[in-house]
Amino acid sequence: MAAERVLRWYEDLRGRELMGFELKEKFSAWGVTDCFCDFDDSLVGTKGVFGVATSDVGQILFNRARALGREISFASAEEVARECLKYIHGLRSQFSVDRPVTLLSVLLTARHLGLGDKDEEVGRASDRMARVYGEDIPDVFPGARETVAALRDSGINLVLATHASPEWTRIKLGGTGLAGCFKGVVCFDVRQPKANQWRSHFPILERDPTRVLVIGDNYWGDIFPAVSLGARGAWINGDQAFSVDSSTGDGRDFSDRVITAHSVGDVVEAILRA
């Protein structure tokens, strides 16, 4: 697999130097000088952290409702956890991880179960969800460190462009050991969708979008809006099936400026192959 080749090249100094040179040549041919890389669910598994947290919240609230003899429509703690995630998604037009939204989702789920906001177990469930923003550190995806190192070795101006608060981003960068890997960190405002902010961020950052490569897992939040402004995109599409040229919805074909990679470990190979 491509990700395995990246890992192998990274372990070999000569291979790492060659990969950095080949990337530099590719970026030069593209006229690309900057790379904006998404963080959550592109480099690290933030959704996995939320999955564990909501599972724990579901168990706490389900047990409490059963202990108090509440008549509830949920047959299991897993169903309660899914209800909590549904509230999170419903409160945000796209999945972003704003702390007030997630804590409110816990309270709304508890109320659905007939539990009061001041119930001790509801407080414990809220505390468990709050750990996501402090103690719970997402796993770094296989190949992410090597991909970041390869991009950095190419000489490109590598910037982290994340849709999360500066404080939480600092915690995750420190906890994952990725702090210091980027020449800059840009935190998009969590109070509005990331997709709506690219147009204003390029001038703020004094970057010409036609000289930027954007890497991310969210086509509509990371790739489409930036490419619409002239950037190139590397879409980490995982198991998402729709094609680039058929997904724009307005007749524009971006297939010549968007490459796809199944995982972050495949990004370098996809760039070199393009």
Image (cartoon, rainbow, N blue to C red):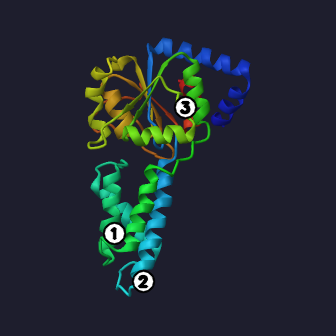
- From the image, tell me which residue sits under label 1: 109
User: Which kind of residue does numbered mark 2 sit on?
Assistant: Arg
Asked whether the residues under the numbered discs 2 and 3 touch, taking CB atoms below 8 Å apart as contact, a structural biologist would say: no
Asked whether the residues under the numbered discs 2 and 1 touch, taking CB atoms below 8 Å apart as contact, a structural biologist would say: no
Where residue 203 appears, x then y in whole percent? Answer: 27, 20
Query: In whole angstroms, how far apart are the C-alphas of marks 2 and 1?
Result: 14 Å
Circle 1 crowding by C-alpha within 10 Å: few under 14, some 14–19, many from 20: many
- From the image, tell me which residue sits under label 3: 267
Which residue occupies 55% across, 12% down?
A: 25
Q: Quadrant of residue 195?
A: top left
Is residue 258 depicted above or below 169 in this figure?
above
Earlier residue among tags 2 and 3: 2
Query: In whole angstroms, how far apart are the C-alphas of marks 2 and 3?
Result: 48 Å
User: Which image quadrant: the N terminus?
Assistant: top right
Earlier residue among tags 2 and 1: 2
In front: label 2 or label 3: 2
In front: label 1 or label 3: 1
Which residue occupies 41% across, 66% down?
A: 125
Where residue 175 appears, x then y in whole percent? Answer: 54, 42
- From the image, tell me which residue sits under label 2: 66
Where residue 77 appears, x then y in whole percent? Answer: 46, 73
Earlier residue among tags 1 and 3: 1
Is residue 213 depicted above or below 162 in this figure?
above
Secondary-structure class at tag 3: helix
Which residue occupies 30% across, 75% down?
A: 116
